[in-house]
Image (cartoon, rainbow, N blue to C red):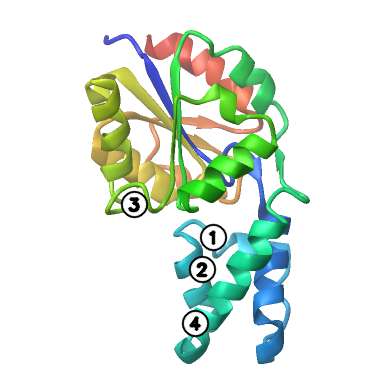
């Protein structure tokens, strides 16, 4: 069994709970156009494919206002990026115990926002790479961002583990050929992660035992 050298994490729903700040930005962006405010529960069902796709889903047929809504969202979200966003319980403690591994973050949030979010939460120091939706030409569920990190590290897929909270994360990892770990505490139920090689039910520190088993 190959020795694991690299752990790739997804950001929203895996490392941090950003659902309130995303919901607030979305409602601010939609407010002038007569849309009913979204709840956090409604928003988390829509996130995962990037900000542009999130706005498109909410607007439905109202594509004529997409650019205005997107601009309002980005302006507000950038100003309130970590107002309510926090790491999930056990995340920082787990990262503290992963010194022996190279680590990367992949997000469908834009790279500058992903990097600034992690910096503001004091978490950027844990990661060798931070990739966003604009870091490569394709985003999840494409395996390209995962393959880009492997390329930068000069590693084969069997030396990497990918941790994510959505079926799109797992699909991207499986396509790239890395070991996939689904987290059930994020934005998706455990049953949505059935294609993952391993499952974490409650806290990220369960990853430590998984890593002992995969080498």
Label drawn at residue 54: 2
The image shows residue 182 at horizontal and vertical percentages of 48, 37
Q: Quadrant of residue 215?
A: top left
Q: CA distance from mark 1 to mark 4?
A: 16 Å
Residue drawn at (36%, 51%) of the image: 140
Depth-wise, is mark 4 or mark 3 nearer the camera?
A: 4
Q: Which residue is label 3 attached to?
A: 141
Disc 4 element: helix
Q: Taking 18 as reference, is 109 left or right? A: left
Q: Which residue is label 1 attached to?
A: 47
Circle 4 packing at 10 Å, graded few (<14), some (14-19), many (20+), is some
The image shows residue 49 at horizontal and vertical percentages of 44, 59
Circle 1 packing at 10 Å, graded few (<14), some (14-19), many (20+), is many
Q: CA distance from mark 4 to mark 3?
A: 23 Å
Mark 1 vs 2: CB contact within 8 A? yes
The image shows residue 153 at horizontal and vertical percentages of 29, 22
Mark 4 vs 3: CB contact within 8 A? no
Q: Which residue is label 4 attached to?
A: 66
Disc 1 element: loop
């Amino acid at each position: 069994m190959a020795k694991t050298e690299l752990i790739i994490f997804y950001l929203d729903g895996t490392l941090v709970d950003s659902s309130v700040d995303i919901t607030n930005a979305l409602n601010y962006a939609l407010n002038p156009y007569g849309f009913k405010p979204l709840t956090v529960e409604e928003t988390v069902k829509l996130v995962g494919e990037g900000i542009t796709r999130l706005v498109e889903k909410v607007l439905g047929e109202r594509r004529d206002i997409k650019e205005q809504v997107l601009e309002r969202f980005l302006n507000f979200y950038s100003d309130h990026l970590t107002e309510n966003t926090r790491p999930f319980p056990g995340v920082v403690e787990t990262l503290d115990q992963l010194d022996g591994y190279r680590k990367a973050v992949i997000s469908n949030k834009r790279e500058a926002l992903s990097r600034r979010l992690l910096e503001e939460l004091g978490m950027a120091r844990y990661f060798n790479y931070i990739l966003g939706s604009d870091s490569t030409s394709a985003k999840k569920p494409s395996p390209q961002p995962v393959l880009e990190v492997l390329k930068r590290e000069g590693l084969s897929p069997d030396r990497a583990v990918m941790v994510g909270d959505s079926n799109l994360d797992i699909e991207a990892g499986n396509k790239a050929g890395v070991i996939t770990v689904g987290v059930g505490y994020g934005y998706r139920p455990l049953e949505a992660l059935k294609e993952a090689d391993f499952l974490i039910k409650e806290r990220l520190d369960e990853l430590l035992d998984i890593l002992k088993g995969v080498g």
